[in-house]
Amino acid sequence: MTHDKPRLPGNFACAPGMRIEAHERVSELQFRQMAAQLSRLEQVIERLERRLWLAVYGVAGVILAQAVQSIMAVAP
């Protein structure tokens, strides 16, 4: 009894090459996604840095205002 196996299409013969191409496409997509996430993360860090400096300048302003107020209270 002979078993007839279905013949594979001719372009299937280079399956390892197709796997490599598919892996390269997936890798490219992953790198693009990582770059996009890195860009968003950098934007978040920049906003956080601006808020931090605003807080630092606010604290410095309060300290200077208290110093000026105490000098004005002592001076007649």
Image: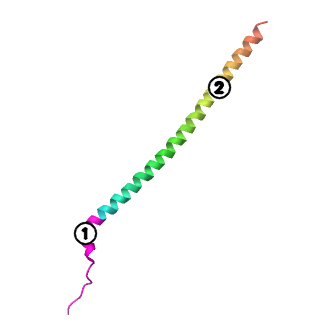
At numbered mark 1, what does the secondary structure look like: helix, strand or loop?
A: helix
Which residue is rendered at x = 38% and y = 59% of the image? 26
Please, which residue is most extreme toward the front here? 10
Query: Which badge, 2 or 1, comes first in the chain's sequence?
Result: 1
How far apart are the alpha carbons under marks 2 and 1? Answer: 67 Å
Tell which of 64 and 38 is nearer to you: 38
**Relative to residue 56, is residue 26 drawn left or right?**
left
Residue 48, image x, y percentages: 57, 37
Magenta highlight range: 1-18
Residue 37, image x, y percentages: 48, 49
**Relative to residue 68, is residue 28 drawn left or right?**
left
**Relative to residue 33, is residue 53 drawn left or right?**
right
Q: Which residue is mark 2?
A: 59
Q: Which residue is mark 1?
A: 14
Which residue is rendered at x = 68% and y = 23% of the image? 62
Which residue is rendered at x = 20% and y = 91% of the image? 2
- Amino acid at dot 2: Val
Query: Is 63 drawn above or below residue 48 in the view shown?
Result: above
- Specify whether residue 10 is painted magenta: yes
User: Looking at the rendering, in which quadrant would you find the N terminus?
Assistant: bottom left
Q: Are marks 2 and 1 in contact (CB under 8 Å)?
A: no
Instruction: State the count of labels.
Output: 2
Coloration of the structure image: rainbow
Residue 21, image x, y percentages: 31, 62
Q: Residues within 10 Å of mark 1 (few under 14, many from 20)?
A: few
